Image (cartoon, rainbow, N blue to C red):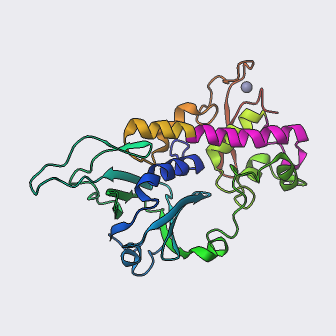
């Protein structure tokens, strides 16, 4: 996979969650259409039936999973995989049988959603279509089918095989300098690999690890256990900042595009090193050039001049 193919990371997933929020949280799933038996794994037995009529009590996120806690005691777990996209459309009930649907975007929460054209949800890769009592139509489209939808008992979610090995949430209060010093202590792996380890910090992927290391001025090749306290402090702050900035940028993208979209291409103009091989370093005081190396089979972008 070249570095041009961008997989949704934590900020993209959080952006999708925020877009789904007004259409799902607190609302009843009035209709569920499941067009095939599986994506990356098989859909749960009687999947559509177990979703229909259920109220979504909370819509949260864990790592790169979107979690819809249902009033049945089950949680609908959604993972976008490589190419999964979720789109939300507003369904406006026509005034009369022949009345055309209102064609202008409708505001739900902080977002504007297009009114669903008749064909919304009919694409051959629209594998799951949900309607809620907003009324809204939510479409899960995934042409490569590495995505996932599962139902897990809410009470034992943390013990489920999908979640039990996951590390801490990078945007939670758990990620502190003191915690990160302990987590990296004695590690002989490059800091880049240590940060990609989902058992340590969950949801951090290749793009935002490269970006966070650049912002903290740390070489991706440095051994994790060799960082000074001051560097770890900068790194903890940079991780939170880069993720928060990306989520904030995603929010404005959503508003501009009038629908929830998982398309991560919109965030690319915020990258300082990722995908910028051979380009000048964006640090004001640096005259270096961004370099690409391969670490553990993944592309790493960094500036050898200012990342030590
Ligand atoms: Zn530089």
Q: Image quadrant of residue 119?
A: bottom left
Residue reaching furthest to the left = 98
Where's ligand 1: which quadrant? top right
Q: Is residue 240 magenta?
A: yes
| Residue 125 visible in the current orientation | yes
Q: Which residue is pictured at 62% across the width and 72% down the height?
A: 157
Q: Is residue 112 magenta?
A: no
Q: How would you classify the magenta stretch by its main secondary structure? A: helix
Relative to 24, does residue 8 appear above or below in the rendering? Answer: above
Relative to 303, does residue 141 appear above or below in the rendering? Answer: below
* Magenta segment boundaries in residue numbering: 218-247
97 left or right of 116 in image: left
Q: How many marks?
A: 0
The one nearer the camera, 166 or 287, is: 166
174 left or right of 72 in image: right
Q: Which residue is pictured at 71% across the width and 43% down the height?
A: 239
Q: Which residue is pictured at 84% across the width and 42% down the height?
A: 232
Q: Which residue is pictured at 58% across the width and 35% down the height?
A: 275
The one nearer the camera, 220 or 96, is: 96
Q: Quadrant of the C terminus?
A: top right
- Residue 212 position in % (x across, y down): 70, 39
- Residue 156 position in % (x across, y down): 63, 76
């Amino acid at each position: 996979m070249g570095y041009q193919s961008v997989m949704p990371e934590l900020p993209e997933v959080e952006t999708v969650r925020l877009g789904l929020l007004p259409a799902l949280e607190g609302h009843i799933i009035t209709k569920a259409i499941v067009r095939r038996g599986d994506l990356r794994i098989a859909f749960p037995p009687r999947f559509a039936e177990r979703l229909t009529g259920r109220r979504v009590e909370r819509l949260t996120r864990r790592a790169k999973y979107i979690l819809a806690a249902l009033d049945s005691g089950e949680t609908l777990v959604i993972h976008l995989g490589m190419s999964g996209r979720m789109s939300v459309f507003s369904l406006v009930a026509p005034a009369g049988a022949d009345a055309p649907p209102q064609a202008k975007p409708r505001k739900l929460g902080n977002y504007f959603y297009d009114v669903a054209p008749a064909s919304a949800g009919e694409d051959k890769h629209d594998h799951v279509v949900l309607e809620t009592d907003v009324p809204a139509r939510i479409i899960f489209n995934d042409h490569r089918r590495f995505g996932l939808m599962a139902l897990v008992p809410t009470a034992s979610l943390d013990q489920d095989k999908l979640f039990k090995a996951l590390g801490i949430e990078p945007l939670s209060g758990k990620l502190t300098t003191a915690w990160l010093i302990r987590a990296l202590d004695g590690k002989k792996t490059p800091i880049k690999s240590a940060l990609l380890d989902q058992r340590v910090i969950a949801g951090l992927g290749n793009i935002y690890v490269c970006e966070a290391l650049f912002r903290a001025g740390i070489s991706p090749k440095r051994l994790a256990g060799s960082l000074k306290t001051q560097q770890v402090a900068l790194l903890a702050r940079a991780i939170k900042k880069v993720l928060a900035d990306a989520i904030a940028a995603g929010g404005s993208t959503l508003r501009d595009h009038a629908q929830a979209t998982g398309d991560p291409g919109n965030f690319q103009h915020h990258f300082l090193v990722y995908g910028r091989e051979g380009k000048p370093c964006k640090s004001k005081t640096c005259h270096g050039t961004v370099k690409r190396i391969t670490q553990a089979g993944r592309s790493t972008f960094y500036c050898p001049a200012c990342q030590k």
